[in-house]
Image (tube, grey):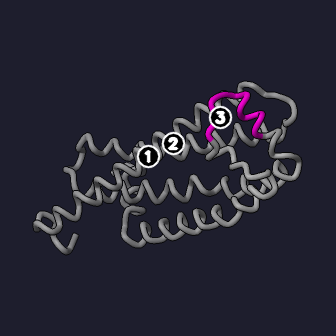
Amino acid sequence: MSKFESFHNKISSSGFISIFFAVFVLFFAAFRIVTPEFEKLSGGLRIPDIAIVANANDIYSLFKSYGQEGRAFYNYIQAMDAVYPLSYGLFFISLIYFYIKKLFKKNSAAGYLIIVPYITACSDYGENICIFIINRSFPAKFGIAADMALLFSYMKWFFFMLSVSIILLGTITFFIKKASGKIGPEE
């Protein structure tokens, strides 16, 4: 068994899944607390991670509209966002691997699904780094950072939704198989 597989086996236990879920929910709730404060400071604008922007100029317009106070407060949000991808990433990885173990034969091609939440979290970190560069260098324009932030943002949301879809399908399939007796209670 490889170290990678051993790691996944360890974190896909119900105990770790529960811990990762709790941490994910705590960070999600924390964002719901600080985001309204940011919106007050920025005149009702959303944080760049969830704002709908079409190009690099939109990102710079957004940062200009935030004002000095909004951009300063966003630094606190970014500190939280340094851990958030890890929290949901570990939750998604542990749960998807749990379903891979329970629903598929060893060495099944379905095992590659574990890559999806890694790409999600890495894309989120890429987006965060680019937005950090933009915020720190503002008002100077660092064009490549804005373009890369958009690319990472699109990737993050695509793979995030794909991860959620895999988890939903895994959950439904798991409970159907469990109800039909194809997965025993000891599993």
Residue 61 shown in magenta: yes
1 vs 32, nearest the viewer: 32
Secondary structure under the numbered disc 2 in the rendered image: helix
Residue shown at 21% from the left, 51% from the top: 104
Q: Quadrant of the C terminus?
A: bottom left
Secondary structure under the numbered disc 3 in the rendered image: helix
- In the rendered view, would you say 59 is above or below 120? above
Q: Amino acid at mark 2?
A: Trp
Residue 134 percent coordinates (x, y): 77, 37
Magenta-highlighted residues: 52-62
Circles 2 and 1 in contact, beta carbons < 8 Å: yes
167 vs 59, nearest the viewer: 59
Q: Amino acid at mark 1?
A: Met
- In the rendered view, would you say 111 is above or below 30? above
Q: Which mark is residue 81?
A: none
Marks 1/3: CA distance? 18 Å
Residue linked to disc 3: 149
Query: Counting other residues with Cα less than 10 Å from the Cα at mark 1, is it few (<14), some (14-19), or many (20 or more)?
Result: some
Q: Amino acid at mark 3?
A: Ala
Q: Which of the marked residues, 3 or 2, is nearer the chain's N terminus?
A: 3
Predominant SS of the magenta segment: helix
Residue 21 shown in magenta: no
Residue linked to disc 1: 161
Residue shown at 70% from the left, 37% from the top: 130
